[in-house]
Image (cartoon, rainbow, N blue to C red):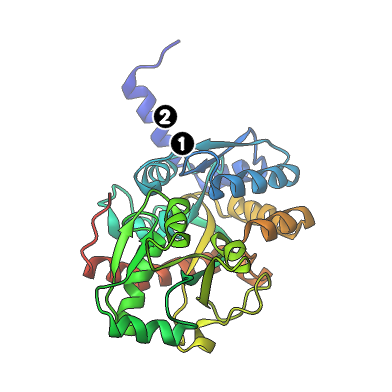
Amino acid sequence: MRLPRRRFLQMAAGAAALPPASRMAMAQTYPSRPITMIVPFPAGGATDTFGRLLGERMRDFLGQTIVVENVGGAAGSLGVGRAARAAPDGHTLIIGTSTTNVLIGALYTLSFDLLKDLEPIALLASEPLLVVTKKSLPVANLKELIAWLKANPDKASAGIAGVGATGHVTGLAFQQATGTRFQFVPYRGNAPAMQDLIAGQIDLMIEPSSNFLAQVRDGNLKACAITAKTRLAAAPNIPTVDEAGLPGFYASLWYGLWVPKDTPKAIIAKLNAAVVDALASPQVRTRLAELGPEIPPREQQTPEALSTFQKAEAEKWWPIIKAANIKAE
């Protein structure tokens, strides 16, 4: 029998206002059906790969299938909005990144609040960026790159994977920190930008480190610095920004997991336990080591740690985006 629209809305509102006892009962039987994990990008990308890897392991812990749903578009804001509007029962998750859960807050006028309409589950992994130049650029390290850029204002070009993307925003911050000026050249992703960098058509890039390590090892690109406090295990010969002469210039591409606001705390705790179990799995750790992202220490895999980190990232990057008057593509 089909319910009248008014009756349906009344029932939906009543479910959202369940008393604590009912919420406790819901948490005790959770999960009661398959879980949807929204990936706010098309299938086949890094976030999609990570989400499927995580979901497979979490399924064993939770006892329910985790179905990945790809909701791409508008730099991930369509998928994030869908998650924010979902029922707060733990059966809809979203795996997001620094782009989808921080940067879009300054790039778009959103119908939801990134920091209030989603509850954090855990920080999953992060990957520092790498400052690289074309092989023919007459610099050998970060200090020489900064000096060359200062001596040649507006002459250099930096490839970016789209306006407002991580590399673009970090490049703006790099200009502010170093007092340099160069042009940004937007591409449809990192791959075509790197092809032009190798070919010498552009001068530099600042993007996730895993994109460049093979080309650096083969001598096709020159690495100047890692934007992190510690060196990469996969490339221990590349100095950090602290060592290379630009102390404190940290930036990363990171991943987190969220649920809609008002999800019961007991469900959040169970999901967090499933994530911690997954991230401790040797299979997951081995695969992530191959992909590039590094898993944070156990004490940073908490909802509170992700909440604090996400807010700090917003406070850091939103003013830079707004000051540059960047408009989303």
Where is mark 1, residue-wise? 15
Which is nearer the eye, 23 or 99? Answer: 99
Q: Secondary structure at mark 2?
A: helix
* Residue 224 seen: yes
Count of numbered circles on the image: 2
Would you place residue 143 above or below residue 105 in this image?
below
Q: Residue at x 52, y 62 (%)?
A: 254
Q: Residue at position x 36%, y 23% from top?
A: 7
- Looking at the picture, how far across and down is residue 300, in whole percent? 61, 70
The disc labelled 2 sits on which kind of residue?
Answer: Met
Q: Is residue 133 left or right of residue 265?
A: left
- Answer few, some or many: residues within 10 Å of disc 1's Cα (few below 14, many 20 plus, some between 14 and 19): some
Mark 1 touches mark 2? (CB < 8 Å)? yes
Image location (x, y in percent) of residue 287: 71, 54
Mark 2, residue position: 11
Residue 257, quarter of the rendered image: bottom right
Q: Nearer the viewer, residue 36 or 199?
A: 199
Cα–Cα gap, marks 1 and 2: 6 Å
Q: Position of residue 220 (x, y in %)?
A: 55, 65
Q: Which amino acid, mark 1?
A: Ala
